[in-house]
Image (tube, helix red, strand yellow):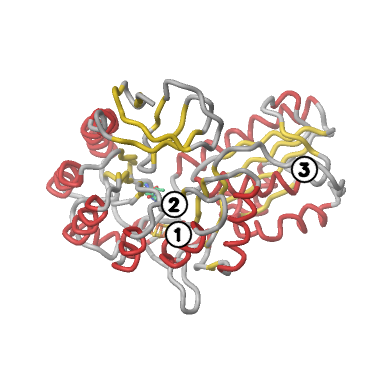
Amino acid sequence: MKKLFVQTYGCQMNLADSEEMAAHLFARGYTLTDNLDQADLALINTCTVRDHAEHRALSFLGRLRQWKRENPQRKIIFAGCAAQRLGEKLKKTFPFLDLVSGARDIDHFAQLLDDSGLFTAQPGAPVTAQTITGYVTIMRGCDFKCTYCIVPSVRGPIHCLPSADIVQRAAQKAAKGCPEIMLLGQTVNAWHEKGKTFADLLNEVSAQPGVQRVRFVSPHPAFITPAFLAAVENNPKIARHIHLPAQSGSTKVLQEMKRGYTREILLEKIAALKARGFAISTDLIVGFPTETENDFQQTLSLVEEAGFSAAYCFKYSPRQGTPAAQMTLLPEKTLEQRLDVLLNKVKGLAEAAYTQQIGSPVEVLMESANKGRTSDNFWVQTTRSYPVGTRVVSEVTAAEGTLLFTRD
Ligand code: 5AD
Ligand code: SF4
């Protein structure tokens, strides 16, 4: 059988898209390998959210020139957001590239493979490796217009998948041994359908036989609504962890970013989530073009006030065609200094959150014989061994770095 090597950059959505594309390639006679030297086909699924991410994907592609030279029968597919942004012109710079498939082409990927004439269908090929988490994409695209962000122009406006399809896919994944379902979308909680909200969807998905836990990524603070909070309160299967991108702690910068909330509103929503047992991680950007030293200080103080369990920090990266790219950049040195200070501030957050769990009761969903995760997303090592997918209720006796230990 021919071998497929997959290299994925970017978010969880890209991981799910890679899984979907790989499934179509399995149906065309490929099996996975994690060794590029043994592969006949390389699939690169790319991200363009920051220049750095795009650059990494392109330099990987550049390295494949030699890989293909060694065996001209080898094939390369360049897919995802950078592929969408750069399009067919990529083939001019990288003439050895066989197929370009933009992020918006994901629904037609099978057709694209067939139209290329490079692949032939071979029914009965294997499925992807099993994990306890089943990814289900529920919406694509974004209707927000954050001034720094390239996603709306690359992925397009929002398109919500029908709830009937989503629920069916979740049920299928659960039946195949995924007790945890992860709902995915660029602004996942913007999902809606006539007469149905995201909260309704969470309840419906979690009611499917075999579904023990439902996670979702990435939500926008605008849709942390009373209906959502009410659904959470009545439904313990909704995981008590949320990755809620704050981006900045300054109301002025948030307005210039067009995020649609103030620092105060964000802190209120965070307090409401924490009151319901949520651990909250976040994304923060430093060095947005209008960010003053005072604005930056407010991001630092937000980290303290919000009590995040983790924060991913990024230097502002101008993206072609976005409103913020027209603005004058701050000096690179300022960006670097601010990133440094912020990284120092968030460094101990995860460890501190882990330490705080000592003495608490936990419910662990096992992902391997001795390791699993709690609903609020802490990694736990159990004393005894359990079958994958078991729920273990115990008490935390110790924490070491980002690992908890239980009495069990
Ligand atoms: N520059 C820096 N960071 C960005 N992000 C999105 N666009 C940019 C940009 N132009 C960050 C945001 C987002 C995460 C996925 O990437 O924090 O939440
Ligand atoms: Fe980008 Fe804002 Fe949409 Fe998130 S909500 S994808 S940051 S435009």
Say above or below: 369 vs 138.
above
Quarter containing ligand 2? bottom left
Q: Residue 3 lies in what quarter of the image?
A: top right
- Label ID, residue 26: 3
Mark 3 and mark 2: Cα distance apart in space: 27 Å
Q: In the rendered structure, which disc, 1 or 2, sits on the residue that comes first in sequence?
A: 1
Are the two marked residues, 3 and 1, in contact with CB atoms closer than 8 angstroms? no
- Identity of the amino acid at label 1? Val
Position in image of residue 160 (x %, y %): 53, 68
Q: In the rendered structure, which disc, 3 or 2, sits on the residue that comes first in sequence?
A: 3
Q: Report the residue marked by disc 2.
A: 217
- Label ID, residue 188: 1
Identity of the residue drawn at 57% across and 47% down = 134
Quadrant containing the N terminus is: top right
Mark 1 and mark 2: Cα distance apart in space: 6 Å
Position in image of residue 300 (x %, y %): 17, 42
Position in image of residue 326 (x %, y %): 35, 58
Q: Residue 72 lies in what quarter of the image?
A: top right
Left or right for 208, reference 341? right
Mark 3 and mark 1: Cα distance apart in space: 28 Å
Please tell me which residue lies in front, 368 or 309: 368
- Specify few, some or many for label 2: CA neighbours under 10 Å numbering under 14, 14-19, or 20 or more: many
Identity of the residue drawn at 87% across and 46% down = 122
* Ligand 1 is within 8 Å of the C-beta of the residue at disc 3: no
Say above or below: 153 vs 95.
below
